[in-house]
Amino acid sequence: MWGATSQPADSYYEVRPECTDVPKTRFKIKPGKTLSARKWQATFTSEGYLDIGKTLSRIQRGGIHPSIRGEVWEFLLGCYDPKSTFDEREQLRQHRRKQYYQWKNECHEMFPVVGSGKFITAPVITEDGQPIQDPLVLQETNSGLSASSSSEIVKELASHGPLDKKVIQWMLTLHQIGLDVVRTDRTLVFYEKQENLSKLWDILAVYAWIDTDVGYCQGMSDLCSPMIILLDDEADAFWCFERLMRRLRGNFRCTESSVGVEAQLSNLASITQVIDPKLHQHLETLGGGDYLFAFRMLMVLFRREFSFCDSLYLWEMMWALEYDPDLFSLYEEAELVGDKADGSKAKAKSVRQCGKFERENMKNKGKNSEAPLPISVFLVASVLKDKSSKLLQEARGLDDVVKILNDITGNLDARKACSGAMKLHKKYLKKAKQT
C-alpha cells in the first residue's frame, strides 16, 4: 500500500530480554518493496508453475516477508524446481521426508539419544571405539529417558564388538555438535526450548552420518539454525540445510595439510590485489597475505557480523542475485550419477529467470573457462574495500586488522553490502579481462 510505513521484523525472531548487547537490526518490512505473501502467491500459475524471475528483483530490493521466508528459501536454494507443479512438489516433499526419517532412524538405532528430544555435550566413545561412561552424558540423557537408558546406551555400544570406522567417526562428532548447539543463537527465545535445541542437534547428527566426506565441522550449526526456525517440519529444514551445504561444503572439506575455505581466501586475495593493490600490499607486509582474518565471514556467511534478522536478509539477497534456474536439476542429476553432474550440456537457460550476479557470470563465461566465484567472496572484498583507508592508516599488525574488522559487527547495511559486492564483481571482471 502506497504511503504505508515500514515495520520492524524483530518480532518474528524474538531476542531474550536479558541479551542487550546483540547487534541492532536494520531490516524492515517495506510495503511495495519486501516480497509479501500476496505477491509471492501471485507468481504461481493455477497448476503451480513459478515465474521466479518476477520475485528475484523484489527480493534484491527489499528481502522476503518473514511469514513466507522458509518456503521461498526452498526455491532459492534449489530444493524445488520452479517449473514443477504443486502436485509434483508435494510428491517430492513426501519422498524426502520419508528419506530423512529413514536416515534418522538409522542414527537412532546406533545411538538412541538421536530422536529422543535430548542431546549430549560430552564424548561417548574413544578414538579406538571404546565406550566412555562420562557422568555428564548419563546426566544429560537420564532426564527424559528411562533411568537405565543412559547406561544401557553405553553397554549397547560395548556389546557390538569392534565398531565400524564410519560409526566411530560419527559418534566422535556427536558431543562436538552438542557443544556447538548450546552456543548457537543463544540470544533467541526460540532456543530456550529444549525441543528446538535437540531438533538442531538431530539434523546435524543425521547430516554428519550421510556426508561421510565432510561430516560435521564447527560453523555448520550457524548455517543450519535459521532453517529450523523458518521451517516447521524437521525434514524440510534438513533438506534446506543440505542444499545450502551443497554450495558451501567445499569450505569445510579438510585434508591433513589444508582447509577447503583456503581456496576462497586465495580468491579473495586475488580480487583485492586487482581492485585495491595498495591494501593488498599492506596486508601482505603485515603478514596477512593468506587473508585468514576473513575466515569466519566466509565460513558462516557473515552470521557474526549482522543481527540474526539481518543475516537472513543478507543471505536471501545473495541467493537471489546468484540464482540459477538450473540449480534444482543440477543437484538432482548429481544425486543420480554420484558426485558431479555435467550441467554444461543443459539447454540454454532463460536470462530473465537468473539473478543479476548470475547474468554477469553468464556474460563472462565464454571468455573465462574457470568456475565463477561466489558472491560471498566479493562481499568480503567489498567490506575490505570499504575499510581500506582505516586499514592502511591504523593497522600496524594483524591484531589491528582483526580489531578493525570486528568493529563492523552491527554496523553493516546488508543491502549496501550486496550492492558493493555487485559493483566490485563488475570492476573485477573488467580489470581481470585487461590483464
Image (cartoon, helix red, strand yellow):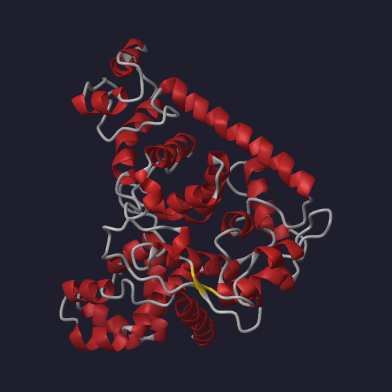
Residue toward you, 62 or 373: 62
Residue 100, quarter of the rendered image: top right
Q: Is residue 421 left or right of residue 383?
A: right
Q: Is residue 213 left or right of residue 6?
A: left
Residue toward you, 43 or 286: 43
Residue toward you, 216 or 133: 133
Q: Position of residue 346 (x, y in %)?
A: 74, 58
Q: Position of residue 350 (x, y in %)?
A: 76, 69
Residue toward you, 424 or 66: 66
Q: Is residue 404 above or below residue 92?
A: below
Specify whether residue 250 is in view.
yes
Q: Please name the residue shown 52% across and 56% down the image.
A: 247
Specify whether residue 369 is in view.
no
In the rendered image, which quarter contains the N terminus?
bottom right
Q: Is residue 379 above or below residue 308?
A: below
Q: Is residue 13 above or below residue 408?
A: above
Q: Position of residue 360 (x, y in %)?
A: 61, 77
Q: Please name the residue shown 63% across and 42% down the image.
A: 335
